[in-house]
Structures are given as C-alpha cells and as structure tokens.
Image (cartoon, helix red, strand yellow):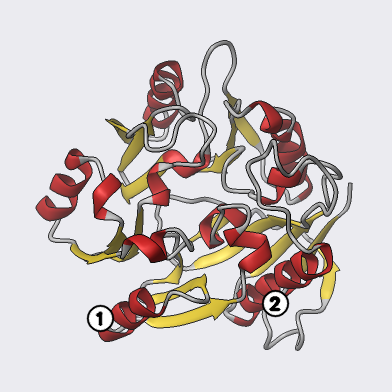
Amino acid sequence: MTNDTFIDAAAAPGGTLVNAVDDGRFGVRSMIAPLRRVLVRRPSTTGDFATAEWERPDPELLVRQHEDFCGLLASLGCEVELADTAEGMVDATFMKDPGLVIGRGAVVFQMSKPVRRGESVLFAEALKAAGVPITAELTGAARAEGGDILWLDAANVLVGRGYRTNTEGVRRLREIFRDEGVSVRSVDMPHDRGPLHVLHLTSIVSPVTEDLAVVYLPLAPVPLLEELEARGVRVIPVPPDEYETMACNVLTIRPGVVVMVAGNPRTQAALEAAGCEVHVYEGSEISVKGTGGPTCLTGPIWRG
C-alpha cells in the first residue's frame, strides 16, 4: 500500500501529490480545532454496493467527486493523507469509522457491519504509513465505530451506544480514554431504520464552533440536547429532507469554517447567517448514495 499527501494549495497549487513525511504531527481532542492532517481513502468502483446499503453510483463520477473533495480540503489548508483504494470494499472510503486518533496515537476498532469487518487492518496500515502509532485496539466482543464518538471538549467525550457501538465497546473506550485523562459518557441511539442503516451519533450532530452545532432534532437523544443546552451551544435544526442529503454531516475545518455536501440550501443559509464560512462539494455519488458525508470520508490525524 502506498500513502500519498495533498499539501496545502499555497505550497502546491492544484493539490499536487507528494510523498508523506512523518514528523510526529498527530493528535485529536476536538471536533472543531483546526484540521491540519486528515486521512482519506480513494473509493472503490467495484463491490457489492447493495449489501453495503449504497445506491449504485456512477463509477467515473464517484472517483471525480472524491478527487474534488480532497482538493477542496487541500485548498483549505489540510494535509490530506491519501490511502489506496480497497478494491471491492465500497464502505472503506469512509475513513471516520474503523478507528480514531486521540492524544498519544490511534485506536483501531472492530466494526459491527459485516461487510466492513476487514477495514480495521487497512486502517491500521494507513495510519502506520502516515507515522501514527497504534496505541490500543478493540478485541473480543467490543465493537465501535468512529462516527459514534463526539468530543465535547478536550477532556470529555460522548459516545453513542447502538447497533454500531455496543455496550462492551463503550466500556473498553472508557478504559482507553481514561488513560488519556478523558472522561466518557454514553447516550443510547434510536432504532431509526434498523441495524443495517447507517446511523451514528455524528449523523445527527455536527459541532461547528464552541457554541454552535448543526442537529437533526427528531433523532437526537435527549441527553445530547441537554448537554448542548448546558454548554450554551446554539442549535441549527436540519430539515427532514436535507437530513436525507447529508446536511447534518458537516466537517469543521476550523471554528466557523465548514465543508458540507452541495444541495442543502436551507442548512447552508442558516450556517452562513450564523457567521460561518461554508464550502460545498458535489457529493451525489460519494456521499448521498453511500449515506456518508464529509465527516464520514475523513479520519482526522491532527487537530490543533
């Protein structure tokens, strides 16, 4: 496997690819701190899209949209570590879920969705190629996915317990985060459309500044809403039709600067009215048909 890097547009106009060089730049304890390095994976154009719960995409457009997405991240100052295609593994392009980088290194998960269970090894290989050490792994009955993990602040994490992250996964995450000096609380996720449908905690909430978040209220756990209110976080509610087109899945590049899927005008307008700088990408194939927005496509390596 090779691992390439987009560097920022000022240094490499057009998102030129260069070899990645590790200088120890990793660590994540926030959803909104400046995103400096991020891991993505080229999408597969072959595989069992139906079993993976995708609407079949146009393969050429799928690849082009992903390339454009990477170029957008680079233009916003992110170093984009680009991992090779996992042929036939269509969900592997969603790099948020197989694990996450925290303070001292990365945690590699075991995944619940049957067609995704081979992704963890590939995720670990990509991180090692980017110079990020693996400090913990989930084993035994523990299951977790990165989309269920929400940083409230540098010392507090909220985990969604549901079909993707189970009780044993939450227990093990508490142990791992405790070693980092981080407290973990959990909230129960709704059934929604069942265990095969993608529903993570960050499918329904995206923090964009310290006091602003995008939320799909009909599926939001009450303890999450209570936590946001207690912290003085204002909520931008996502309309039901725009929830279906990934409007609630917003990637914060730095506080108030965000990336979202094009085609969600009301949520975009609400963000802009709140003072945010919004960048959009065409995601009909890479996001909407696979029900994975910009946070799903990215595995943050370094925020700070």
Q: Position of residue 107 (x, y in %)?
A: 57, 34
Task: Give the quarter of the image for residue 171.
Answer: top left
User: What amino acid is at disc 1?
Assistant: Ala
Mark 1 secondary-structure assignment: loop
Identify residue for label 2. 71
Q: Position of residue 117 (x, y in %)?
A: 69, 27
Q: Nearer the viewer, residue 193 or 132?
A: 193
Res 181 seen here: no
User: What amino acid is at disc 2?
Assistant: Gly
Q: Which residue sits at x=65%, y=53%? A: 24
Count neighbours of disc 1 (C-alpha within 10 A) and say few if under 14, some if 14 to 19, many if 20 or more: few
For the residues bearing labels 1 and 2, Cβ distance under 8 angstroms: no
Is 157 placed above or below 94 here?
above
Q: Position of residue 100 (x, y in %)?
A: 55, 42
Per the rendering, the mark at residue 193 is: none
Q: What whole-number distance in Å separates the C-alpha atoms at marks 1 and 2?
A: 26 Å
Q: Position of residue 114 (x, y in %)?
A: 66, 26
Identify residue for label 1. 274
Which one is earlier in the sequence, the residue at label 1 or at label 2?
2
Q: Nearer the viewer, residue 123 or 93?
A: 93
Mark 2 secondary-structure assignment: helix
Task: Give the quarter of the image for residue 57.
Answer: bottom right
